[in-house]
Amino acid sequence: MTDHQTPQLTVDGRGLLCVTLLLRLRAAITDAPAGTIVHVHATDPAAPLDLPAWCHLTGHHYLGPISAETYALRLTATPTPTRPDAPWHRQAD
């Protein structure tokens, strides 16, 4: 079992609004395998709300804050697809 304190992938979203952060995060995890622990560095005050909501939408597992500006999540094997241009919306069938 991988400790969620040790990331296998890190996404730096410092200085970005959550909209751009989610675009960067979605792109970064495209080829990552299920179970990958991802640390997201974010300074947007909305990140503590938006990251868990995005994980809920996609099916990834939000693991919580690691520090004041770092959040952890674990990728799921069967995420709900989201739009490449709008990762906060489910992809239409």
Image (cartoon, helix red, strand yellow):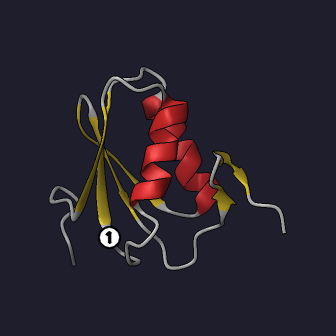
Residue 13 placed where, x, y %? 34, 35
Whether residue 49 is visible, yes or no, is no
Which residue: 41% across, 62% down?
A: 29
Residue 39 placed where, x, y %? 28, 50
Position of residue 56 in the picture relative to residue 51 (left or right) = right
Q: Name which quarter of the figure residue 53 lies in.
A: top right
Quarter holding the C terminus is bottom right
Residue 68 placed where, x, y %? 24, 28
Position of residue 27 in the picture relative to residue 86 (left or right) = left
- Secondary structure beneath dot 1 equals loop
User: Mark 1 highlights which residue?
Assistant: 36
Depth order, front residue of 84/81: 84
Which residue: 41% across, 23% down?
A: 44
Which residue: 42% across, 20% down?
A: 45
Position of residue 82 in the picture relative to residue 49 (left or right) = right
Q: Name which quarter of the figure residue 28 lies in.
A: bottom left
Q: Say what amino acid the circle numbered 1 marks.
A: Thr
Q: Name which quarter of the figure residue 7 lies in.
A: bottom left
Residue found at the very far left of the displayed protein: 6
Which residue: 47% across, 25% down?
A: 17
